Amino acid sequence: MKRSILVDIILRPVIITLSVVFFRMKVVNRRNIPKDGVIIAGNHISNWDPPFIAAAVPRAVHFMAKSSLFKTRFLSWFMQKLGAFPINRRSAVNSGALNTAIDLVNRGAAVIIFPEGTRSKNGKLLPAKPGVGYIAHATGAPVLPFFMEGMDDPLATLFFKSRFKVTFGQLISPGELEEQHKQGGPGRSAGYILEKVREIKDRNEQEKRKDR
């Protein structure tokens, strides 16, 4: 799968401009993003999430997208140029998507994963699917957790009631993840990753309460 450099030259600057000018997006702890192969994992609250988390990461990224977006030849070509690869959310096993993610991370790429496997309709974190734990174990790569907010209500940001925000946490080392895997396999690792996402969410909420 070959990602187009035109995404970074043309599309990325447009998305960054939109995120800053119209949605006042704030990115916290961007410095925590490594330059080597990494899994970037966080919550999923909107169809807006992929382009804006990609805009928050100062390097090329790849991500999974629902298979329905690859139905036509043009859409399939376009999505692949964006760095996306298909996943069938109705299937219990997505070996093709998992193997693609593993290959990308092993080649030093940054791959965005939503551990919940689908969008949360009320903003609450859903149980983690084991996929991200499987990828982490197979690659031995670190995982960078993140928490997104505001993307589920873009109109509120336009009226200055809120803003888009992406907060990155501390990098989870391969050793930490391997210990979790030994105790309960990929499901345990995935749950551990999502718990780190929850910790970011809780800290953000505590900071909001202090500011009131």
Image (spheres, rainbow, N blue to C red):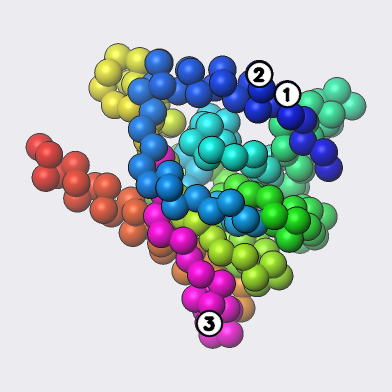
Which amino acid does the dot numbered 1 rest on? Leu
- Asked whether, in this view, residue 89 is left or right of residue 151, the answer is right
SS label for mark 3: helix
State yes or no: residue 97 in magenta: no
**Mark 2 in CB contact with mark 1 (< 8 angstroms):** yes
Is residue 70 depicted above or below 134 in this figure?
above
Is residue 88 depicted above or below 177 in this figure?
above
- Spatial distance from mark 2 to mark 3, Cα to Cα? 42 Å
- Spatial distance from mark 2 to mark 1, Cα to Cα? 6 Å
Q: Which corner quadrant of the image does residue 141 belong to?
A: bottom right
Crowd around label 2: few <14 · some 14–19 · many ≥20 (10 Å)? few
Q: Is residue 189 visible?
A: yes
Q: Nearer the viewer, residue 21 or 44?
A: 21
- Asked whether, in this view, residue 134 is left or right of residue 201, the answer is right
Which amino acid does the dot numbered 2 rest on? Ile
**Mark 2 in CB contact with mark 3 (< 8 angstroms):** no
Residue 10 numbered tag? 2
SS label for mark 2: helix
Residue 6 numbered tag? 1
N-terminal-most mark, 2 or 3: 2
Which residue corresponds to mark 3?
179
Q: Which region shows up in magenta?
A: 166-183
Identify which residue is drawn at 82% across, 38% down.
2
N-terminal-most mark, 1 or 3: 1
Identify which residue is drawn at 74% across, 29% down.
5
- Asked whether, in this view, residue 88 is left or right of residue 60, the answer is right
Residue mark closest to the camera, 1 vs 3? 1
SS label for mark 1: helix
